[in-house]
Image: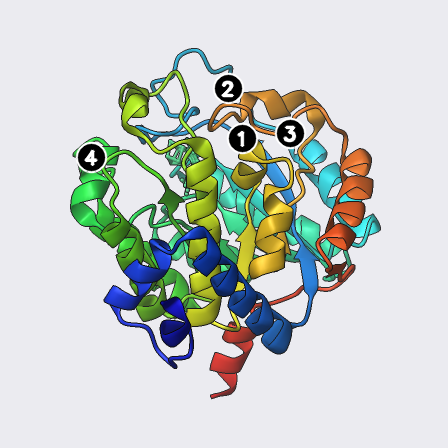
């Protein structure tokens, strides 16, 4: 039974595997425990990050991603600086507290200087009050530092899987898609002083339960401050689509992601965990379920609506037709149902990060 495991201070890899394989009844016990830990360490609060997906131009060819470079069916866009600043203003005026600038990966001077300028402008238009998270892929340490010095203080870069061999099956094998380089980027981000977030996808082709258990150990060992993990959802125009018939059902992927979130909450009590959009793509109340059992961050999409259907990483991406204010009313009600309160106007920094700098 998992009761004994849940009473332990620390989990072994075998414990984690048992928790991931837990039955429906046992799972209820796991979720009760993780919800209790969230309440005890963080309270039943949720913090917002308005998500601006400002460009789908990408130099990479990850086999799972709908906006990969070689998908010629994608109409590429790059939102103008003015439109990005308008969206940032919306986040500020509506008390979101923070925003995330996310894009495909581009590595050049024009791009790094542009982000530096945007970060400074967002800081200035919000009287330094908006927190800024970046998620623009792998960059040089100099670029990460340039953006940090401009005022960005959190960075999200998913390792995608802690298993190097699995990573090779999900990406082209070249210098460009190198697991070790991605790991080095995470180390650079931590060294610079970013609140560093990583994550993985759940239910990928070739992925095993042991892989997922190792992913959780990886995050614990990396001592991350934030995590965003969600179910893998196939996209028709990607190379990985051919393995779709061997996958778990979407419902199973959702359920396994919830277990991953619950176990991570127990392992890392004070980190920030995102209830990702991909959860909502599978289940209308997928994000609420995640919030109930341990996640504490929501990323409502505030990308101008005309661009949303061009950032389709996977099929059935939700909220591509809702404007930002519809979205705001909707999440308020949704979080209440999940028994949580949105903390408007607050950064909601990772407590784990704050505790580690005090040490
Ligand atoms: N380009 C940056 C990067 O890769 O770090 C940031 C944007 S990228 C679209 C953000 C995340 O989307 C990736 O880290 C990946 O985990 C996720 N993603 C891509 N394709 C996906 C899919 N088919 N299903 C679920 N998540 C996916
Ligand atoms: Fe580009 Fe990120 Fe998609 Fe990979 S996951 S193809 S880096 S946008």
Instruction: Say which element carries label 2.
Output: loop
Seen at 30% across and 64% down, the residue is 217
Binning the other alpha carbons within 10 Å of mark 4 as few (below 14), some (14 to 19) or many (20 upward) gives: some
Circles 1 and 2 in contact, beta carbons < 8 Å: yes
Q: How many marks?
A: 4
Can you tell which of label 4 and label 1 is closer to the viewer? 4
Label 1 packing within 10 angstroms: few (<14), some (14-19), many (20+): many
Label 2 environment density (alpha carbons within 10 Å; few <14, some 14–19, many ≥20): some
**In the rendered image, is residue 49 in sight?**
yes
Question: Crowding near pointer 3: few (<14 within 10 Å), some, many (20+)?
Answer: few
Looking at the image, which is closer to me, 103 or 149? 103
Q: Nearer the viewer, mark 2 or mark 3?
A: 2
> Which numbered circle lies on residue 169?
4
Q: Residue at x 51, y 15 (%)?
A: 75
Can the viewer see residue 151 in this picture?
no
The image position of residue 264, as x and y in percent, is 43, 63
Residue 161 vs 305, above or below: the answer is: below
**Residue at image mark 2:** 76
């Amino acid at each position: 039974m998992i009761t004994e495991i849940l009473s332990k201070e620390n989990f072994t890899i075998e414990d984690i595997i048992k928790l991931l394989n837990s039955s429906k009844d046992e799972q209820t016990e796991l979720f009760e425990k993780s919800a209790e830990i969230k309440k005890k360490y963080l309270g039943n609060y949720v913090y917002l990050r308005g998500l601006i997906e400002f460009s789908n131009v990408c130099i990479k060819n990850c086999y799972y991603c709908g906006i990969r470079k070689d998908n010629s069916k994608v109409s590429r866009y790059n939102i103008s600086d003015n439109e990005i600043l308008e969206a940032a203003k919306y986040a500020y005026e509506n008390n979101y507290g923070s925003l995330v600038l996310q894009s495909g990966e581009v590595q050049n001077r024009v791009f790094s200087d542009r982000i530096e300028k945007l970060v400074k402008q967002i800081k200035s238009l919000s009287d330094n009050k908006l927190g800024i998270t970046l998620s623009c892929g792998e960059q040089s340490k100099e670029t990460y530092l340039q953006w940090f010095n401009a005022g960005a203080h959190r960075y999200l870069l998913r390792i995608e899987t802690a298993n190097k061999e699995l990573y090779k099956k999900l990406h082209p094998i070249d210098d460009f898609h190198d697991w070790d380089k991605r790991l080095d980027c995470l180390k650079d981000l931590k060294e610079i002083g970013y609140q560093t977030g990583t994550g993985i996808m759940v239910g990928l082709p070739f992925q095993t339960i042991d892989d997922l258990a190792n992913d959780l150990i990886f995050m614990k060992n990396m001592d991350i401050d934030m995590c965003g993990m969600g179910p893998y959802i196939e996209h028709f125009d990607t190379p990985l689509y051919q393995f779709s018939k061997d996958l778990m059902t979407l419902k199973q992927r959702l359920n396994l992601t919830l277990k991953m979130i619950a176990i991570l909450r127990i392992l890392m009590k004070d980190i920030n965990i995102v209830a990702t959009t991909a959860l909502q793509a599978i289940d209308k109340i997928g994000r609420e379920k995640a919030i109930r059992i341990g996640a504490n961050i929501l990323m409502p999409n505030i990308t101008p609506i005309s661009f949303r259907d061009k950032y389709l990483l996977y099929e059935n991406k939700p909220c591509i037709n809702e404007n930002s204010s519809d979205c705001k009313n909707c999440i308020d009600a949704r979080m209440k149902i999940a028994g949580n309160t949105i903390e408007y106007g607050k950064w909601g920094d990772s407590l784990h990060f704050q505790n580690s700098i005090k040490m």
